[in-house]
Image (cartoon, grey):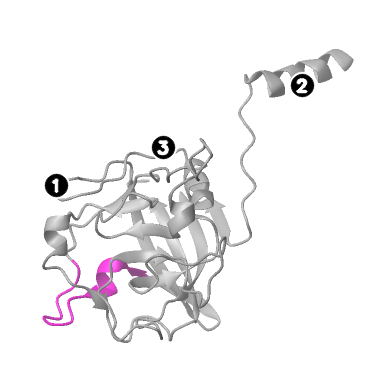
């Protein structure tokens, strides 16, 4: 028995056994059978109180806006142009995706850059009282408000992982970039500090101005679920 215990210990510290999975916060659920990661989220405001207008959607999910935010607060860099907000760390979502055996690719940034990585389906689940939630793909949520045309159906999303942020002054270590910006899912490659990017480029950003379709999501601040599903599972 003692020999078996020692063997188990050797495997656990020697790297021959599978590494322990990370402990995730309550706001993230991994379903390995369904190949999904589900995140607690809220419907974001389409106009922030300190801005004079609402802006087209450029991200699907990010941290919310915090008035008088202090260093270290989860204050979303792009909270004025998102569909939903959430409270977990983007790096925790990336870790959850890796628990589904996905490996991050490479985020894009710039005019001709294209996102790289495994494909992921993205949905928003809306509660329906005591019944099952209603699931919306993004092309049922986003429309061009001028033409009422939905987001193009051919748009796909990639698990890119985040570019590292710059090291703090006097420090060599770089952080997971999305943990500084709070951006989780981007429509256009305006920067690389995110975890997921679409296959849209900056060329489309010039003319594709999207907003949330009326009567699809609940009111601002209401809870929903953001669902990330491995494509072709």
Instruction: Kindly check if marks 2 and 1 are in contact, taking CB atoms under 8 A apart as contact.
Output: no
Q: Residue at x 40, y 53 (%)?
A: 229
**Circle 3 is placed at which residue position?**
103
Q: Can you give x and y, in whole percent of width and height, for residue 97 in the image?
A: 47, 46
Q: Nearer the viewer, residue 165 or 9?
A: 165
User: Residue farthest to the right?
Assistant: 2
For residue 130, what is the image quadrant? bottom right
Q: Which residues are magenta?
A: 135-151
Instruction: Kindly check if marks 1 and 3 are in contact, taking CB atoms under 8 A apart as contact.
Output: no
Q: Is residue 8 above or below residue 66?
A: above
- Total numbered labels placed on residues in the image: 3
- Determine which of the numbered discs, if any, sits on residue 9 in the image: 2
61 left or right of 115? right
How much space separates mark 1 and mark 3, taking CA atoms? 23 Å
Q: Is residue 125 above or below residue 36?
A: below
Answer yes or no: is residue 33 visible: no
């Amino acid at each position: 028995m003692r020999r078996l215990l020692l063997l188990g210990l050797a495997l656990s510290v020697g790297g021959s056994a599978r590494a322990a999975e990370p402990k995730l916060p309550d706001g993230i659920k991994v379903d390995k059978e369904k190949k999904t990661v589900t995140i607690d989220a809220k419907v974001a405001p389409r106009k922030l109180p300190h801005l004079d207008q609402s802006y087209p959607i450029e991200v699907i999910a990010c941290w919310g806006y915090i008035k008088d935010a202090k260093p270290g607060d989860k204050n979303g860099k792009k909270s004025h142009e998102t569909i939903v907000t959430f409270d977990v760390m983007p790096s925790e979502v990336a870790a959850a995706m890796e628990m589904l055996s996905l490996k991050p690719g490479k985020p894009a940034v710039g005019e001709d850059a294209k996102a790289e990585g495994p494909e992921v389906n993205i949905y928003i689940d809306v509660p329906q009282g005591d019944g099952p939630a209603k699931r919306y793909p993004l092309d049922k949520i986003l429309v061009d408000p001028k033409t009422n045309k939905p987001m193009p159906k051919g748009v796909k999303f990639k698990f890119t992982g985040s570019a590292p942020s710059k090291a703090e002054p006097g420090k060599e270590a770089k952080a997971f970039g999305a943990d500084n910006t709070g951006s989780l899912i981007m429509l256009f490659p305006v920067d690389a500090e995110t975890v997921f990017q679409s296959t849209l480029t900056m060329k489309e950003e010039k003319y594709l101005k999207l907003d949330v379709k009326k009567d699809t999501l609940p009111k601002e601040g209401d809870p929903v679920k953001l669902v990330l599903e491995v494509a072709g599972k």
